Image: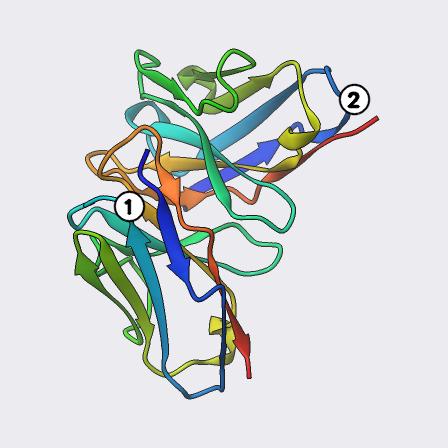
């Protein structure tokens, strides 16, 4: 089973600032990585697939990069609606599909 | 509009059973594989089970294998999760999620149904 590790657990950022979230895989997942956003009381929403492709309707301020075992989600200029939890997911070796433990982006 | 709506959650005693449902609309349900994913209170996401479009392929997480059964009724556009021998650690929000036709990520997800296992 591939273990996904996200850092940091919590990221405190001011509105308008840049946020950089990391995700590491225990073995190579190529570019088979997705990012999801989850707001309190809501279901996860797909942001990024293929490590760097934005899902339909996702603003350009969200970008993904990386391959192999190291991945990054960048939010270029945080808006109020971006404060949420973010999860990475590998879909290179399944089952099981595995998720990182999440990063909380909170208002500084 | 693609929509997934879960139901069937509730409070159940340890050792009890519960059947979750997920009603799909807005897409050809019989062409898509489906999944159940859960999230314990204050915790991260855990994949639970997968079923292919024709029900020919089914997978389970080790934590639920032998206790949970996934199924679907394509005529009713519905996905199910039969949960038996429930434990306190099964307490979670349960989401159904569609897997894209030729891709392996999940989109969209339903709003979830809460299962609480407690005496």
Bin the neighbour count of mark 1 within 10 Å (Cα to Cα): few under 14, some 14-19, many 20 and up: few
Up the image or down, B85 lies above or below B95; here it is above
User: Which chain does the residue under circle 1 lie in?
Assistant: A
Q: Secondary structure at mark 1?
A: loop
Residue A48: percent from left, percent from top = 29, 58
- Residue drawn at (23%, 58%) of the image: A70
- Residue drawn at (56%, 54%) of the image: A42
Q: Quadrant of the C terminus of chain B?
A: top right
- Residue under label 1, please give it: A26
Residue closer to the observer: B39 or A26:
A26
The Cα–Cα distance between marks 2 and 1, rounded to whole angstroms, is 37 Å
Residue A6: percent from left, percent from top = 39, 58
Residue closer to the observer: B96 or B58:
B58
Q: Do the residues indicated by labels 2 and 1 lie within the same chain of the protein? A: no
Picture quarter containing residue B60?
A: top left
Picture quarter containing residue A98?
A: top left
Residue A50: percent from left, percent from top = 20, 52
Q: How is the image coloured?
A: rainbow
Residue closer to the observer: A5 or B60:
A5
Bin the neighbour count of mark 2 within 10 Å (Cα to Cα): few under 14, some 14-19, many 20 and up: some
Up the image or down, B28 lies above or below A42; here it is above
Residue A41: percent from left, percent from top = 62, 55
Q: Secondary structure at mark 2?
A: loop
- Residue drawn at (52%, 21%) of the image: B64
User: Which chain does the residue under circle 2 lie in?
Assistant: B
Residue B44: give its label: none
**Is B109 left or right of B86, judged from the image as shown?**
left
- Residue under label 2, please give it: B13
**Is B75 left or right of B113, judged from the image as shown?**
left
Asked if the residue at tag 1 contacts the one at tag 2, i.e. Cβ–Cβ closer than 8 Å, the answer is no
């Amino acid at each position: 089973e591939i273990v996904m590790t996200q850092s940091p657990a919590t990221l405190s950022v001011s509105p308008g600032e840049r946020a950089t979230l990391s995700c590491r895989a225990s073995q190579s997942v190529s570019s088979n990585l997705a990012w999801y956003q989850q707001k309190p009381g809501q279901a996860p929403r797909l942001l990024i697939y293929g490590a760097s492709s934005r899902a339909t309707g996702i603003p350009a301020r969200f970008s993904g990069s990386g391959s192999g075992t190291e991945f990054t989600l960048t939010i270029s200029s945080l808006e109020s609606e971006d404060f949420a939890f973010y999860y990475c997911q590998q879909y290179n070796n399944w089952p099981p599909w595995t998720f990182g433990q999440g990063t909380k982006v909170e208002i500084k | 509009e693609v929509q997934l709506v879960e139901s069937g959650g509730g409070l159940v005693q340890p050792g009890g059973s519960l059947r979750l449902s997920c009603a799909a609309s807005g897409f050809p349900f019989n062409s898509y594989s489906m999944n159940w994913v859960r999230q314990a209170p204050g915790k991260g996401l855990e994949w639970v089970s997968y079923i292919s479009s024709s029900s020919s392929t089914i997978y389970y997480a080790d934590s639920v294998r032998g206790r949970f059964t996934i199924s679907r009724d394509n005529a009713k556009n519905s996905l199910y999760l039969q949960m038996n021998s429930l434990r306190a650690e099964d307490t979670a929000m349960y989401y159904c999620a569609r897997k894209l036709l030729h891709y392996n990520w999940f989109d969209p997800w339903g709003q979830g149904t809460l299962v609480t296992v407690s005496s």
